[in-house]
Image (tube, helix red, strand yellow):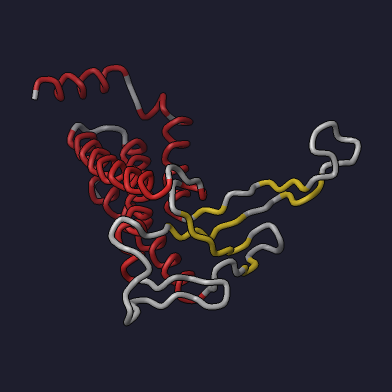
Amino acid sequence: MSLRTKAIALILIILIADQTLKIWVKINMPFGKDIPLFGSWGIIHFVENNGMAFGMEWGGKIGKLALSLFRIVAIIGIGWFINRRINHNSHWGLVLALSAIFAGALGNMIDNMFYGMIFSESSFRQSAVMFPSGGGYSSFLYGKVVDMLYFPIFDTNFPNWFPIRAGERFIFFRPVFNIADLAVSCGIISIFLFRNKMFTIIEDITFWHCEVSE
């Protein structure tokens, strides 16, 4: 199997897994519902966000549009870079890590682009309907990203004698995320941890020399 085929296969696996879980959650779970996975520290918890990964938001409606447009440009750029790296026989680990980042970014972009048009609004009382007769809850590029993976590994309280936030609740890990977020994070962490293997001075000089020459 060629490296290009492996990269395409990884992208498709991540996208299919991500979208399948998001659609299932969207049409089967009311907003905020919990399904325990691993006791109290692994939960399917349905939330949506208007912004970035792990539930972060930025800039309201205009910020969301700007973020969506930036994502489209970034996804095209990452795809181009992956293709160039494959053509220059770069390290397989780098290509697959970049492919995971590409798939994750595209997975959340699909939510932004289409979910507002193909789903009704989720509520705390009922799940959403796919392709509702009255139309979706929003327009193109204004869909909400579906998050559901929640791992509050430690859920406790600070001791009363603690100098900061005494007696207050402490949860680790608080963010709710999805498979797309996980793919992006794993890709970035892999590049950081194995950068010495993925990049070589000779390879990078050759790569960028070819880019300038072209």
Residue 40 is situated, as x and y percent measured from the top left of the image, at: 71, 61
Q: Nearer the viewer, residue 101 or 161?
A: 161
Return the residue found at the far bottom: 133
Q: Pick the residue in front: 54 or 198.
A: 54
| Picture residue at 68% right of the left edge, 46% below the top | 172
Task: Work out which residue is located at the far left of the displayed protein and give it.
Answer: 214
Location of residue 158 by image quarter: top right
Residue beneath the point at 35% across and 46% down: 62
In depth, the one of 72 and 5 nearer the eye is 72
Determine whether 65 is above or below 123 in the image. above
Residue drawn at the location 25% of the way across and 41% of the way down:
73
Instruction: Describe residue 174's horizontal placement relative to residue 138 as left or right.
Output: right
Q: Residue at x 45, y 30 (%)?
A: 192
Q: Is residue 143 left or right of residue 57?
A: left
Vertical arrangement, residue 110 with respect to residue 88, above or below: below
Q: Position of residue 16 (x, y in %)?
A: 36, 63
Estimate the x, y position of residue 199 in percent, counting from the top left.
34, 25
Quarter occupied by residue 86: top left
In the picture as drawn, the residue positioned furthest to the right comes out as 161
Q: Is residue 14 left or right of residue 40?
A: left
| Quadrant the C terminus occupies | top left
